[in-house]
Amino acid sequence: MHANNPNLKHQFSTLEQQHHSYVAGMWVFLATEILLFGGIMVSYTVYRFQYYEAFTAGSHDISLPLGTVMTAILLTSSLFMALSVRASQLNQPKLCALLLAITIILGLIFLGMKAFEYYDEFHKHHFPGRHFAFHGVHLTHVALFFSFYFVMTGLHAIHMMIGIFLLALMAVLSLRGHFNSERYEPVEMAGLYWHFVDIVWIFLFPLLYLVGTAQ
Amino acid sequence: MIIGHVVAKRVYFLVFAALMILLALTVTLAEVNLGRFNIVVALTIAVIKMLLVMLWFMHLRYSSHLSWAIAGAGFLWVVVMFALIFSDYLTRSWLGGVHVP
């Protein structure tokens, strides 16, 4: 059985073992990503405690309604991602590709809104540097908030671009018949990456958009 | 033969509905002034949302115990990083007269 099944790579004994190895390996990579974003979030929290008023003032300036819509779009894209992995599991390559395309479109809408937000912040001279300007006090500390804002959302946006590229690749491979019920792991791994990027945003949203709403 | 666990569509839709309700809840509660507890409430909801995504969308619920251990290790190290850094920053003022830069 072993030598005859084209879905089983030669280094594995069974399809289950192959599947578990893919998933465990992907989680090792995701654990390093958790620490990458975790490190930035720790330093953000340190400065938020120290410059509480400045960070609240900075957060006030980013649009909460826009951030809420962006979060909703990203959560919806995660639903379509989960459904596309399911379609791949059930031998439905065309449905899988279609659901991946919807996920990609939602991701692109998210990035478009992000670009609009960046444009707005640049326009208001909120990009840290020589031309930074902010009404009110705590100027240097608000600049620190915006440094965190651009680094955190920028790194997240780069991850999304990589994710969109991976999903497009998976859609093409799915249409070419590379996946079936016994071998759909690449789609699932791309999905794990996409969901992880979604989780990063789930934390960036309260940290950047919600900290100053009530104050 | 299907490898891995196929989750019912209904479960995905339920998880998605829960995520949207939690999003509405966190935005609503952010408008209420709870002082310093605002961030605690917001991050608690974020952790619940994360667990929903990880357990169902990412299939961690149906993954091997090895995967659980690896995912848990990632978060454990973040907690260690938080604990050590804040045991420094939050206790500096206890010495008295020491200015925190």
Image (cartoon, rainbow, N blue to C red):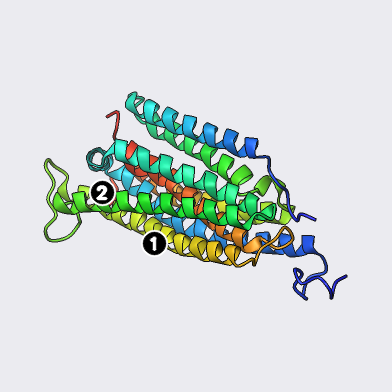
Which residue does the numbered mark 2 point to in the structure image?
A117
Q: Which is nearer the eye, B46 or A164? A: A164
- x%, y% of residue B38? 38, 30
Q: Which is nearer the eye, B8 or A149? A: B8
Q: Is residue B80 visible?
A: no
Q: Residue at x 15, y 48 (%)?
A: A139
Q: Residue at x 62, y 58 (%)?
A: A93
User: On the rendered image, what quadrant is the N terminus of chain A found in?
Assistant: bottom right
- x%, y% of residue B53? 56, 44
What is the number of the mark on residue B48?
none
Q: Which is nearer the eye, A158 or B66? A: A158
Work out whether B38 lies above or below A105: above
Q: Residue at x 38, y 26 (%)?
A: B28
Work out whether A39 lies above or below B28: below
Name the amino acid, label 2: Glu
Q: For the residue labelled by badge 2, is the local secondary structure a helix, a strand or a loop?
A: helix
Query: Residue B39 occupies which quadrant of the picture?
Result: top left
Which residue does the numbered mark 1 point to in the structure image?
A158
Question: Around disc 1, counting alpha carbons within 10 Å, would you say few (fewer than 14), some (14 to 19), or many (20 or more)?
Answer: few
Q: For the residue labelled by badge 1, is the local secondary structure a helix, a strand or a loop?
A: helix
Q: Is residue A90 visible?
A: yes
